[in-house]
């Protein structure tokens, strides 16, 4: 508790404090509430950091936190057996939840705000016709308008067995090239994963209904990575990398998508179903390059394996670090890899694994690279890392030409979603916020909060498409979190 000397110092807004022995009670003046019990006596915890006060009129006390709602100080505890310890982490979580709820409330009023500001499509078009906006500015503002107008709608998932999805939590979602199917991986409470395919043909306003195919497959192993594979036709298969468990080794499994469809015609063969024993794959990629036809790659610990599905032939390339992300180029015979060390390198597929000079390009980040995306003309590459840095690299000059600010990551393996047709890039941060940037100038267009409180176990998985539900679909974003699926549509 505080003595009279502290009262005079509060009046002059100084941050020094004198503590008296426990048991003596005193009161501060009307500007500051009574100090909490448990002040440091020299033998307890004495945190070295001080918390920011709730307002400029309230002084900072080393080792204390001022709660603006309760209008009193609380002691910051480093964390022990106290029944309700107030730590920096709990304060941070509380602030994040307050921010999330505020953004959700602002989203509900977003349409009204845009109407009041006069920021709408008709006014932009009129200004463009009158010559007040050039083509570049018009496209930029129209893009920002469309992204800001996306409203969250909950998607109804129809299934012949609704209980099959009632308790399972979405872990990963992945839309195919035509955006009429969604491959899902769900975490099962009893352990393991369940995966299946959702048809997106019914994803239209105002109903937003989708259909889950009846055939759901279960594995007691974790899915480390996955991608679409085009063996018989475009996106005919799904490639899954499964982690080993106990005496069962890890593997890469190629599943035909027809396995998940229950009403396929009689005599319709499901296609090739095979599994390759691959220990501990961090990442995978399917090749659409004609010089590596029907091949896939897996990124392992200090090794890259390129495997032919038809012949089973493998090429092995030794690396100095774990390969966390991969993508094949289409026109050039190159495989780009992002490593835990921060290195990004390309493998020339024309070179033998024993030969020299198979590293075609080398780029470097300061942290572990979690995602690489090659742009369509294959002259630029987008990469993100575990420090939250997102860079656009020019592969001709090997220089960073643009950086995208705002992404949050500390240690998670988070993907990027680049959509050149819409001119945007999407990423979900470790803080559970989905952020959308303009691909051309790096401007952050929108930050979407999660419908649920921030949690390391509830990071949303998203998929963006220019044609959600098929060729006649509208552009939009799909977000899967916990047991729910949401759609953010332009229309």
Image (cartoon, helix red, strand yellow):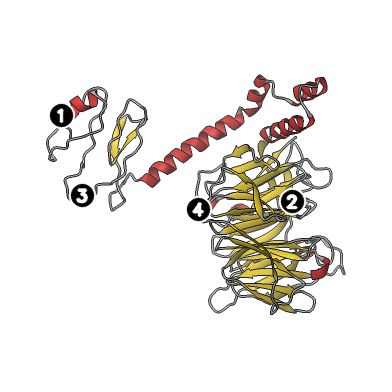
Asked if 341 appears above or below 42 in the picture, the reply is below
Q: Please tell me which of labels 2 and 1 falls first in the chain.
A: 1
Task: Indicate the secondary structure of the residue bearing disc 1.
Answer: helix
Q: Please tell me which of labels 4 and 2 falls first in the chain.
A: 2
Regarding residue 216, the answer to whether it shows in the image is: no
Mark 4 to mark 1: distance in Å? 44 Å
Q: Residues within 10 Å of mark 1 (few under 14, many from 20)?
A: few
Mark 1 to mark 3: distance in Å? 23 Å
Please tell me the numbered disc located at residue 211: 2
Q: Nearer the viewer, mark 4 or mark 2?
A: 4
Q: Nearer the viewer, residue 180 or 21?
A: 21
Q: Please tell me which of labels 4 and 3 falls first in the chain.
A: 3
Q: Nearer the viewer, residue 274 or 133?
A: 133
Asked if 314 appears above or below 283 in the picture, the reply is below
Left or right: where 348 falls relative to 223: right
Left or right: where 423 falls relative to 3: right
Task: Indicate the secondary structure of the residue bearing disc 2.
Answer: strand
Q: Which residue is mark 4?
A: 410
Is the Cβ of the residue at disc 2 closer than 8 Å to that at disc 1? no
* Residue at point 60%, 39% (across, down): 448
Mark 4 to mark 2: distance in Å? 36 Å
Please tell me the numbered disc located at residue 44: 3
Q: Nearer the viewer, mark 2 or mark 1?
A: 1
* Residue at point 54%, 47% (across, down): 408
* Residue at point 58%, 73% (across, down): 244
Task: Indicate the secondary structure of the residue bearing disc 4.
Answer: loop
């Amino acid at each position: 508790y505080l003595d009279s000397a502290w009262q005079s110092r509060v009046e002059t807004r100084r941050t020094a404090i004198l503590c008296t022995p426990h048991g003596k009670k005193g009161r501060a003046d009307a500007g500051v509430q009574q100090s909490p019990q448990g002040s440091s006596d020299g033998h307890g915890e004495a945190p070295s950091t001080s918390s920011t006060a709730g307002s400029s009129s309230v002084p900072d006390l080393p080792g204390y936190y001022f709660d603006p709602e309760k209008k009193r100080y609380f002691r910051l505890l480093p964390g022990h057996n106290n029944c309700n310890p107030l730590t920096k982490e709990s304060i941070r979580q509380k602030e994040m939840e307050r921010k999330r709820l505020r953004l959700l409330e602002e989203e509900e009023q977003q349409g009204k705000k845009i109407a009041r500001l006069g920021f709408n499509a008709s006014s932009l078009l009129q200004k463009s016709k009158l010559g007040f906006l050039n083509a570049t500015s018009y496209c930029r503002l129209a893009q920002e308008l469309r992204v800001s107008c996306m409203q969250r709608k909950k998607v109804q998932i129809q299934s012949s067995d609704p209980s099959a999805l009632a308790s399972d939590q979405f872990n990963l979602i992945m839309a195919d090239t035509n955006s009429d199917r969604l491959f899902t991986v769900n975490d099962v409470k009893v352990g393991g994963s369940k995966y299946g395919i959702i048809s997106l043909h019914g994803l239209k306003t105002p109903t937003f209904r989708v259909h889950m195919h009846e055939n759901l497959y279960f594995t007691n192993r974790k899915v480390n990575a996955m991608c679409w594979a085009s063996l018989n036709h475009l996106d005919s298969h799904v490639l899954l990398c499964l982690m080993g468990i106990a005496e069962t080794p890890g593997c890469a499994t190629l599943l035909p998508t027809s396995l998940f469809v229950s009403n396929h015609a009689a005599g319709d063969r499901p296609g090739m179903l095979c599994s390759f024993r691959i220990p501990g794959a961090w990442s995978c990629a399917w090749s659409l390059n004609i010089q590596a036809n029907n091949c896939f790659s897996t990124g392992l610990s200090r090794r890259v394996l390129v495997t032919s599905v038809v012949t089973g032939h493998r090429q092995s390339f030794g690396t100095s670090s774990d390969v966390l992300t991969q993508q094949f180029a289409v026109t050039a015979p190159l495989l780009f890899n992002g490593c835990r060390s921060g290195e990004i390198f390309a493998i020339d597929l024309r070179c033998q694994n024993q030969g020299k000079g198979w590293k075609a390009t080398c780029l470097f980040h300061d942290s572990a690279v979690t995602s690489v995306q090659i742009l369509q003309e294959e002259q630029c590459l987008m990469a993100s890392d575990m420090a939250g840095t997102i860079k656009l690299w020019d592969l001709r000059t090997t220089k960073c030409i643009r950086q995208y600010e705002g992404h949050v990551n500390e240690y998670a393996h988070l993907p990027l979603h680049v959509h050149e047709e819409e001119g945007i890039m999407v990423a979900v941060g470790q803080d559970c916020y989905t952020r959308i940037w303009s691909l051309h100038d790096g401007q952050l267009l929108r930050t979407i909060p999660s419908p649920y409180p921030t949690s390391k176990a509830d990071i949303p998985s998203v998929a963006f498409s220019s044609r959600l539900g098929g060729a006649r679909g509208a552009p939009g974003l799909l977000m899967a979190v916990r047991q729910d699926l949401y759609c953010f549509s332009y229309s």
